[in-house]
């Protein structure tokens, strides 16, 4: 009887058949380095996936930080749409892909099957969030949103999204950079995003808004348009001034000063926001409800 | 192939793997050690034709040999080779695009003998249960459930070993077995 621990020379024996096949097909064990490097490569993919996810998360963290979450109503948005605008879809898809890469790589490492999917997801998300917060704190989120983000299809950098939300004359909202303030004469000058200058009257502004004018460079203004009864020219009357939120303000092309009361963005105001005063202005009423001292 | 190599019966698998890497003839000892166990395992999974089992087994051992350097000594060799057998069997079922039908299964009595070991099932099973009933019920199960039951109750594997063989988290093994039992019980009732 053949010992189970010795080679049986019988040609019908399975061991002999397998060894013959190994001999005929010249099969050799794959070198150990192939398995080692495959495993290492998978971990590299995993680390790369976490780094990619963290970079994308930094853009999301930056985007969230840049928004005034309590003021979405003033911008005429709903909470859901405001969230959609703040969270760029293309980055959200990117973070899902990074998560998939991490899961796929870990599952295929030598012992990756031992980790439950929930643990992999939790680890990946923690890595994204911690890494993303650190990168965002070091301005990487903003840089990515501005540079790489500008190259991506279906993506608008957050500063331009904010500009489209707040530079909305039809709703009584304009943004600009304060270039001069003379509170004794109740006048201040604003550089609009297109580079034009506009002089505005601060008579109706609250002390809080006047303080904002004195200290902030970029501001958001809620107001209304009215037409001068004698000259017929349009004027923009500011009701409240809010500082521009976040680090980024849309670049302004400096232009020459425009005379007061000339048609500018004011001419874009529809009748709907033309009012006899701030009280009837919807965005202002909302602001009064949210931040009464304005 | 006239070389005769012999190893003590208690030689550990890892030592045989190292010997096989040095000299392919030593691999015969590993084949001998696992041939019968794997053949029984394949039959329990539903590969009933002898010729099919032989083909699958040959592929299993060839793949094992080809990937010997992948064997991690932190893992039981038996789990590792069972994993290869598991993968090969699933590939066999996929290639044939069939689910096993049991018409030629000679292992029914063997299966039935194992039933008392299944504490939960034992109380549920009718005493008149025949080997054929159990066999037919097992064969109606999804392969992953059947395999979980086979490994746990017929191969008597621990959860960690089943985890290594089926390449799923240990926590999922318990869930899989519990679901498998739940699905098996209605199939054992006489009305089914």
Image (tube, grey):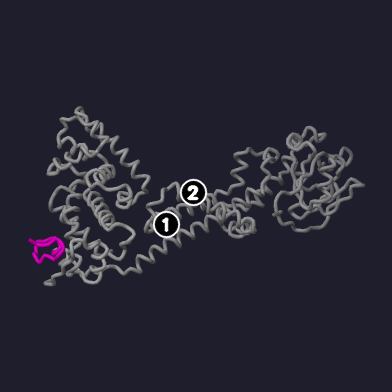
Q: Quadrant of residue A207?
A: top right
Q: Quadrant of the C terminus of chain A?
A: top right
Q: Which residues are magenta?
A: A1-16
Q: Position of residue B143 (x, y in %)?
A: 26, 44
Question: Tag 1's secondary structure?
Answer: helix
* Tag 2 residue: A122
Front residue of B22 and A134: B22
Report the disc number at residue B21: none
Q: Is residue A226 left or right of residue B109?
A: right
Q: Chain of mark 2?
A: A
* Tag 1 residue: A105
Q: CA distance from mark 1 to mark 2?
A: 15 Å
What secondary structure is the magenta-colored segment mainly?
Answer: loop
Q: Position of residue B65 (x, y in %)?
A: 24, 64
**Magenta highlight on residue A4:** yes
Q: Quadrant of residue A31?
A: bottom left
**Magenta highlight on residue B180:** no
Q: Position of residue A77 (x, y in %)?
A: 65, 39
């Amino acid at each position: 009887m053949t010992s189970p621990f010795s080679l049986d020379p019988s040609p019908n024996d399975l061991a002999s058949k397998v060894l013959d096949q190994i001999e005929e097909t010249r099969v050799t064990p794959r070198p150990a380095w192939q398995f080692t490097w495959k495993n290492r490569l998978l971990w590299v993919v995993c680390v790369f996936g976490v780094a990619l996810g963290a970079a994308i998360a930094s853009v999301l963290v930056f985007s969230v930080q840049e928004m005034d979450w309590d003021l979405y109503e003033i911008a005429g948005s709903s909470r859901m749409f405001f969230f959609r605008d703040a969270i760029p879809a293309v980055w959200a898809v990117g973070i899902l892909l990074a998560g998939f890469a991490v899961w796929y790589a870990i599952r295929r490492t030598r012992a990756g099957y031992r980790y439950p999917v929930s643990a992999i997801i939790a680890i990946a998300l923690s890595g994204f969030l911690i890494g993303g917060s650190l990168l965002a704190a070091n301005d990487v989120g903003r840089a990515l949103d501005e540079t790489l983000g500008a190259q991506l299809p279906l993506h608008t950098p957050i500063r331009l999204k904010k500009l489209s939300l707040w530079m909305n004359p039809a709703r009584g909202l304009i943004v600009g950079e304060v270039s001069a303030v003379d509170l004794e004469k109740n006048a201040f000058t604003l550089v609009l995003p297109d580079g034009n200058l506009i002089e505005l009257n601060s008579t109706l502004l609250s002390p809080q808004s006047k303080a904002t004018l004195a200290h902030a460079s970029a501001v958001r203004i809620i107001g209304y348009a009215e037409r001068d009864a004698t000259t017929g020219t349009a004027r923009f009357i500011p009701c409240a001034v809010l500082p521009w939120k976040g680090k980024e303000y849309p670049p302004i092309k400096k232009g020459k000063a425009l005379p007061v009361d000339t048609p500018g963005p004011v001419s874009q105001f529809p009748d709907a926001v033309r009012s006899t005063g701030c009280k009837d202005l919807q965005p202002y009423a909302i602001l009064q409800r949210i931040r009464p001292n304005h | 192939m006239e070389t005769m190599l012999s190893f003590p019966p208690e030689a550990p698998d890892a030592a045989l793997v190292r010997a096989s890497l040095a000299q392919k003839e030593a691999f015969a000892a590993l084949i001998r050690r696992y041939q019968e166990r794997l053949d029984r395992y394949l039959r329990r999974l539903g590969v009933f034709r002898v010729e099919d089992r032989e083909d699958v087994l040959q592929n299993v051992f060839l793949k094992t040999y080809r990937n010997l350097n992948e064997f991690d000594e932190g893992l039981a060799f038996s789990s590792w080779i069972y994993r290869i057998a598991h993968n090969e069997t699933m590939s066999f079922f996929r290639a044939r695009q069939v689910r096993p039908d049991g018409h030629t299964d000679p292992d029914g009595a063997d299966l039935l003998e194992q039933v008392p070991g299944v504490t939960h099932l034992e109380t549920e099973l009718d005493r008149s249960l025949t080997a054929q009933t159990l066999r037919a019920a097992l064969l109606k199960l999804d392969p992953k459930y059947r395999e979980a039951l086979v490994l746990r109750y017929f191969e008597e594997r621990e959860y960690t070993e089943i985890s290594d063989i089926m390449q799923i988290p240990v926590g999922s093994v318990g869930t899989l077995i519990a679901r498998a039992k739940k699905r098996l019980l209605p199939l054992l009732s006489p009305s089914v």
